Image (cartoon, helix red, strand yellow):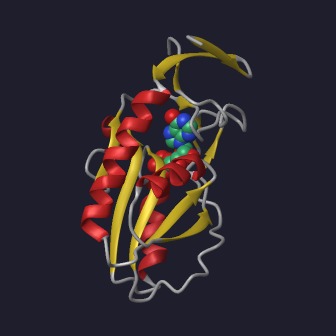
Amino acid sequence: MKEVTVHDKVFELYISAEKIQARVDEIGKAISEEFRGRNPLFVSILNGSFVFTADIMRACEMDCEVSFVKLSSYQGTETTGKIKTLIGLDSNIAGREVIILEDIVDTGNTLTHFLEILDTYDPKSVTLVSLLTKPEVLKDRVKVDQIGFEIPNKFVVGYGLDYDGLARNLKDIYQLKGG
Ligand code: IMP
């Protein structure tokens, strides 16, 4: 599928499932090399990261655990800048090596806010992994340790990412056509 319509907008194919999988495998290998024997705790930020998390975990060859949290700031295709509540950070974080898994870091608001909360749980270390970043928007606000793909400031869907609830199930990543 070269194009998909989601709600009222048309998106075009941007990153194929094969390319995503190849990059996810590379990142999984790098994480395994760094963390093998240290039983890191993946903290996956819902909703968008659930697909990436499932693939990253299966690309890692080591003991590891996962926990899911929810913290959202988006409605529609524009950030509202408002951070909603955080739920789910119930695992024992103190003294753990935490690897945060994000689908996309756009303004960095979500992550900045989340890192502040996480810090109060006293983790041993925090590593940030994001499938996508939008460097034009992010500037140097948050340092992401592992990035799948750096993309321009255009709205994308698929592979867990949604537009008003739809398109998370698409295997490839699509970019808003035109604007
Ligand atoms: P930030 O707080 O601006 O960094 O936004 C982070 C969150 O906004 C991500 O976890 C996504 O849920 C959502 N988001 C940002 N950009 C996009 C996009 O292009 N497509 C879909 N969701 C996005």
Residue 137 vertical placement versus 101 (above, below): above
What residue is shown at x 36% (from left), y 28% (from top)? Answer: 152
The quadrant the N terminus occupies is top right
**Residue placed furthest toward the front:** 61
Location of residue 170 (image quadrant):
top right
What residue is shown at x 61% (from left), y 45% (from top)? Answer: 74
What residue is shown at x 61% (from left), y 81% (from top)? Answer: 90
Location of residue 139 (image quadrant):
top left
Name the spot of residue 50 as percent of width and height, x first: 59, 52
Residue 40 vertical placement versus 175 (above, below): below
Closer to the camera in the image, 62 or 67: 62
Name the spot of residue 96 as percent of width and height, x first: 40, 83
Name the spot of residue 161 as percent of width and height, x first: 58, 39
Q: Is residue 163 visible?
A: yes
Name the spot of residue 122 as percent of width and height, x first: 41, 87
Closer to the camera in the image, 71 or 5: 5
What residue is shown at x 41% (from left), y 79% (from top)? Answer: 119
Closer to the camera in the image, 139 or 177: 177
